[in-house]
Image: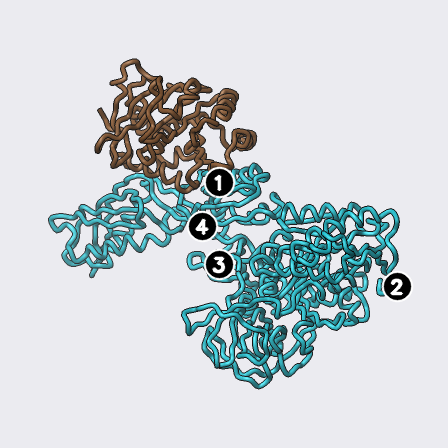
Chain colours: A brown, B cyan
Amino acid sequence: MLKNDLILRNPLRLMGHENEAIVPQGGFGAVLARAGVGKTALIVQVALNTMLQQKNVLHVSLDDPVDKVNLWYQEVLNSLASQYHVRQIKELWESIQMHRFIMTFKVEGFSVPKLEERVKDLTEQQIFNPHMVIIDGLPFDERLRTPLEGLKTFSVNHRLHLWFTVTTHRHQTPGEDGLPVQLSAVGDLFDAAIELQPEGKKIHIRCLKGGPEASEACDQLLDPSTMLIQEP
Amino acid sequence: MATRIEKIRNIGISAHIDSGKTTLTERILFYTKRIHAIHDVKGKDGVGATMDSMELEKERGITIASAATYCEWNNHEINIIDTPGHVDFTIEVERSLRVLDGAILVLCSVGGVQSQSITVDQQMKRYKVPCIAFINKCDRSGANPFRVVAQLKDKLGHNAVALQIPVGLEADHEGIVDLVTMKAIYFNGDSGETIRVEEIPESLMGLAMEKREVLIDAATLFSDELTEAVLEEAPIPAEMLIDAVRKGTLERKITPVFMGSAYKNKAVQPLLDAVTQLLPCPADVSNQALDLDQDEAQVTLTSDAAQPTVALAFKLEDGQYGQLTYIRVYQGALKKGDTVVNVRTGRKVKIGRLVRMHANQMEDISEISAGYIGALFGVDCASGDTFTDRSVNLTMTSMYVPEPVISLAIVPKDNKAEINMSKALNRFSKEDPTFRTYVSEETGDTIISGMGELHLDVYIERMRREYNAEVTSGAPRVAYRETITRRAEFNYTHKKQTGGSGQYGRVAGYMEPVNGEEFSFVNEVSGGSIPTQFIAACEKGFRNCLPKGPKMEFPVTGVKVVINDGASHSVDSSEMAFQAAARGAFLEGYMKAAPVIHEPIMKVAVETPTEFQGGVMGSLNQRRGMIIGSQDEGPMCVIESQVPLAEMFGYSTVLRSLTQGKAQFTMEFATYRQVPQSISEEIAKKRQEEKKNVA
């Protein structure tokens, strides 16, 4: 019951999607925001939800070391436990921890072939078979088209879906399609894009791509104190 | 001792296992006429090499302890420390490189740069020791010295430059071509003692010219004179080239490479020439001390015998004549009869007997001057202690001491063995800072820790031979815990009322699991059902049950006990009665509360070259480990995992063989976690067997 409760409180469900599979196998999703607004917190909630469903998440971080990423998960889970009055949080964590693997790279050391090699090491040795991959901290610039196409092939071949965090900047205006300029050149590769927009003391979560037609159903708030999606 | 400091060389010989360090040292001693016969490391004559004086070294054919000696070559005095190659004895390399001015890095022409080569290279870097490389075993099948030169560049990042090329390899290895003098050198006589200089064979001239160009090119960076000569296409005198190479070597920007075969008595003499020409004298090396009177400001020491004395003790040996302390004098001089101060303890020490070492033999001397290494008797100190004359308050930084990686529990055979074992352990841990010993508070086991299986094996054998202490060894016992997993009620009456004063007490309540605490006691008794004066006794009774849990006698943790009812008798109730009642209540509730065993889980971080990442992860998985993640750091990666402590015994050996010795790991306590059912059953079985044996 405990796990089901938390699954039902999936952030993507709360954002009005019928199910959280808004990104199909081989598909890309993106969480966009300025630095420090809450991209990693949101993506960790998505990851935790996947783990609660006994599916494996490979969290690739190009910014933070393993310990720090692990801490994110602990903090978000503790916040969830506190919000929904879950008592046996330690036991819950122990039951889902094996569904997550963290890989960290230095930005300059990251490449698609390297990632594929690492994932192959894990899958061939039956150590870890991811269903979802998070790539946190990849700088989105004009040179990214080719590597992203490589990642697309990778995700199709391995039958998984990828979520990216994308850092935007205050001074940049969105493109004609309404997507931030970081996604302009590669927007066609993405099935979903969610943006976090701070306005005063509130952080709005807006669906830029993917999800239901009515955009207001997708307009939720992130609680800045817990970084959890607020109940409507 | 020679008086001119420019003519002194203090060198270490370091390398991976079996590269030929001790064999090379044996040849050096022979050619310098320090010894008159060559003996093999594990020869048929059973004598063993000079520097392997310990019986165990001769039997096993390995160097266990570093050994110091000295010799003379070309009017230079060369003090040599031959070091072990096994990582288990790495402290010997650390302490030697700490006090030496230069080093020879020996490499096998077949094996090339191996795991310990990387470690000793890092150690040389740590202490900024200039080195020359000697590619040994050019007579071996598969010898390829140029491949080894390339490995020196790729794997160790050295600017390796060959100063020789071989004349023949494998069975045809006859000599070397010296690229500085452009002559071929051969070694005749029964032991290669006769040097024959000839013209370079026609077939090697092209290669020799090519390699000489490379050498000159590298050396020009260190000499304007040489650069000019090259630009003017003038002849390049040997001295000019050697001076440039020397400058680069002293700055650690060039690693001159020599080659030969110590076992076949080829090319050792040119190596000795290189030691005198290219490696530093004590005056060429900058040695620093910290001034304790000036807030640890750095002070540069001078190799001047007239200056205040500063010396560093780097090795201890406890022998039949007391403690022998190996010491390097950096400044001033240590003379017999002098009084010096141990800066760490502040104690004054009078210098009694001073000796100079030649392997395990000693020669009495009256003085150790700046730049020299010697030994003292009768001075109680620790490795890394600084001695000064009383005019200065300087201290030198000690050597780096790596943490042990493996532990064993040892049990003495009998009482006598226990006493002797104690003496042995005290002595060994004093001599070797990487060998640690302690008694586990929880299990009572005597634990020894070291750098590898061989390390501990050697000490156990030495305990047997030198102290007549027979011990058995095994994996250290794991500190398991017990806890409960659900709430359970209890309602226990302790009653002994058979006539006269009796005992009566009833305690009722419940127990439940609690996170983050070992034990919590809550009193919810109301209406005086248990008189207030007996509540503390109830708590005491519960607490007394914790050290030995009812399930398997492991310490109990994470239990919250709440008492909310009870009963007492006006005469028979007492503190003792309620303690007994609480004990009974605990036992009653505990078994209904689904108790389980918890085991310590360690956070294990393995640093490994990325090519071994898969294998390492597999090895952790096999140990019921859970991989948290991997951190990519260029050619290396760090794998973080959580592994039960019970599965980590012997892991250092497994990791070494999985990764060719290139990986290392750290381990620290993370949390306690429930043991799987199958493991719990195994533990229960073992406990029953132990109880049977005790009975």
Q: Earlier in the sequence, mark 4 or mark 2?
A: 2
Q: Name which quarter of the figure residue A137 lies in.
A: top left
Q: Separation of disc 1 and disc 3 at Cα? A: 36 Å
Q: Separation of disc 4 and disc 1 at Cα? A: 18 Å
| Image x and y of residue B34, in percent | 77, 72
For mark 4, what is the residue? B668
Q: Are marks 1 and 2 in contact (CB under 8 Å)?
A: no
Q: Which mark is residue B631?
A: 1
Q: Is residue B443 above or below residue A225?
A: below
Foreground of the two, B618 or B151: B151
| Image x and y of residue B427, in percent | 55, 69
- Which three-letter amino acid code belongs to the residue tagged 1? Gln
Disc 4 secondary structure class? strand
Q: Separation of disc 4 and disc 2 at Cα? A: 58 Å
> Going 26% across and 22% down the picture, which residue do you hit?
A219
> Going 53% across and 45% down the picture, which residue do you hit?
B607
